[in-house]
Image: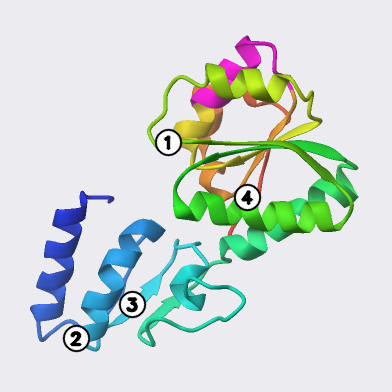
Amino acid sequence: DRPAGGRVLERAQALAADPSVIGVVGTYNSGVAAVVQPVLASAGIVMISPGNTNPTLTLGPDPSHPVRPFSNYFRLVVPDSIQGSELGDYAFNVLNVRKVAVVSEDKAVSLALVDAFTDKFTGLGGTVATRQVFPDGTSDFTGVINEVKKVSPELIVFGGEYATAAPFRMQATTQGLTAPLMGSDGIKDQAYITVAGPASNGDYASSVGAP
């Protein structure tokens, strides 16, 4: 569940006010977790997420000076700092790709993923030929696709979730941009394949870990 910001806060406050609650399993989305963390922490309630991947939730906003924001918070999955790095290594050393286009939503979690990819990939000797960032909720990607087509990438690295990635993939293919797309666990969903259809053939996604 990904309720609106006000509702998230209300639900977190209700949990914090309930003396029978000692722990919460959740949230799924990192953005929701950022709202819930301090509320549960103030009540001493343990929070264990099976899905949050934003590195800042455990390391703070400055990766060069990691500070754990809330001692009550834990995650059971790989953060995007590791996913992005592994994707960069896979693209360079397994797929033998040397030139990519990076496309991302403007959400913090999406940007963290592509930042980690870029650091690893360029550090190995790869080139990010263009980097395009679009607002969350974008539905027409023509402008982004036109910019990416100019550099003829071997691979498109996508920061975002399947609800955005699938229409991007469809539009890109329709407009002649057929390079494979690579994303994180955000696109590792049957819905991506269902919506994108045959255009998704040959695309890549990482996972947050084995069940």
- Residue 99 at x, y percent in the picture: 83, 37
Q: Which residues are magenta?
A: 167-178
Position of 78 with respect to 123 (left or right) is left
In the foreground, 83 or 108: 108
Which amino acid, mark 4?
Val
Q: Nearer the viewer, mark 3 or mark 2?
A: 2
Question: Which label sits in the foreground, 1 or 3?
Answer: 1
Q: Amino acid at mark 2?
A: Ala
Assess whether mark 3 and mark 4 are in contact (beta carbons under 8 angstroms).
no
* Nearer-the-camera pick, 9 or 49: 9
Query: How dense is the environment of label 1, judged by Cα within 10 Å: few (below 14), some, or many (20 and up)?
Result: few
170 in the magenta segment: yes
Q: Are marks 2 and 1 in contact (CB under 8 Å)?
A: no
Cα distance, mark 2 to mark 1?
35 Å
Q: Position of residue 97 (x, y in %)?
A: 86, 40
Q: Which mark is residue 148?
A: none
With respect to residue 175, does 37 lie above or below? below
Regarding residue 191, the answer to whether it shows in the image is no
Q: Residues within 10 Å of mark 3 (few under 14, many from 20)?
A: many
Q: Is residue 163 left or right of residue 198?
A: left
Q: Pointer 4: what residue? A: 114
How many angstroms separate mark 1 from mark 4 (CA)? 15 Å
Q: Considering only vertical position in the picture, is 98 above or below 168?
A: below
Q: Identify which amino acid the numbered label 1 is placed on.
A: Pro
**Measuring 55% from the left and 41% from the top, which residue is drawn there?**
187
Residue found at x 19% / y 86%: 43
Residue under numbered circle 2: 43
Q: Earlier in the sequence, mark 1 or mark 3?
A: 3
- Which residue position holds label 1? 135
Label located before the other in sequence (4 or 3): 3
Residue 47, which numbered label?
3
